[in-house]
Structures are given as structure tokens and as C-alpha cells.
Amino acid sequence: MRKLVIALAAALAATSAAVAAQMEAVIESIDADTRTVVLEDGSELLVAEGIDLSAIEAGATVMITVDDATNEVTEIVGQ
């Protein structure tokens, strides 16, 4: 029984680590040096390494994926 509880706890931890939020937003500004984007509503988000910030521009409507564990943007897709 103990092994089953440990296995279930490990599976739950692995599942919750992969949770991400998606949102549609308009980019207000981009700072490639600090790897941040500011959204039209004033929210400032840190962008994970490996995301190409040159592919987006201010004023663009995008779909943003944010990793709930790190609060970093893991994907930005133009609409």
C-alpha cells in the first residue's frame, strides 16, 4: 500500500508540474535585453530562454503560454 501511495504522489507531482496557462493578449512593448514583454493591460511577463522575441512586435495580438511553476512565458504565437 505504501508503494502505491508513493507512486500516486510522484505521478501527481509530475502532472502538476506540466500545468500551463494560455491567454490571448496584445503586446505593448518588448525588452529583449531583460527578456520581458509588457502586455496592453500593464502585465509584465518574463520570457523563457529559447523564445525568439524578434518574431513578435509591439501591437501584435498573440497567444501566450505561461508555465505555472516558473511563471515564465514558454510560447508566444502570433494571431
Image (tube, rainbow, N blue to C red):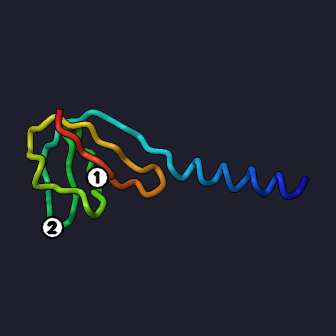
| Res. 59 image quadrant | top left
Query: Could you tell me residue 55's position as x and y percent?
Result: 11, 50
Q: How many marks?
A: 2
39 sits to left or right of 13: left
Residue neighbourhood size for the residue with mark 2, other residues' Cα within 10 Å, grouped as few (<14), some (14–19), many (≥20):
few
Q: Residue at x 78, y 57 (%)?
A: 6
**Of 20 and 44, which appears nearest the observer?**
20
Farthest-out residue, right: 1
Query: Could you tell me residue 18's position as x and y percent?
Result: 50, 49
Q: Residue at x 20, y 48 (%)?
A: 38
Secondary-structure class at tag 2: loop
The residue pinned by badge 2 equals 33
Query: Could you tell me residue 21's position as x and y percent?
Result: 41, 40
**Of 74 and 27, which appears nearest the observer?**
74
Query: Could you tell me residue 19's position as x and y percent?
Result: 49, 45
Does residue 20 lie above or below 52 as drawn?
Answer: above
Could you tell me the amino acid type at mark 1? Answer: Leu
Residue neighbourhood size for the residue with mark 1, other residues' Cα within 10 Å, grouped as few (<14), some (14–19), many (≥20):
some
Quick one: quadrant of the C terminus?
top left
19 sits to left or right of 28: right
Q: Residue at x 23, y 57 (%)?
A: 51
The residue pinned by badge 1 equals 45
Secondary-structure class at tag 1: strand
Could you tell me the amino acid type at mark 2? Answer: Asp
- Give the mark nearest the N terminus, 1 or 2: 2
48 sits to left or right of 17: left
Does residue 59 lie above or below 11 as drawn?
Answer: above
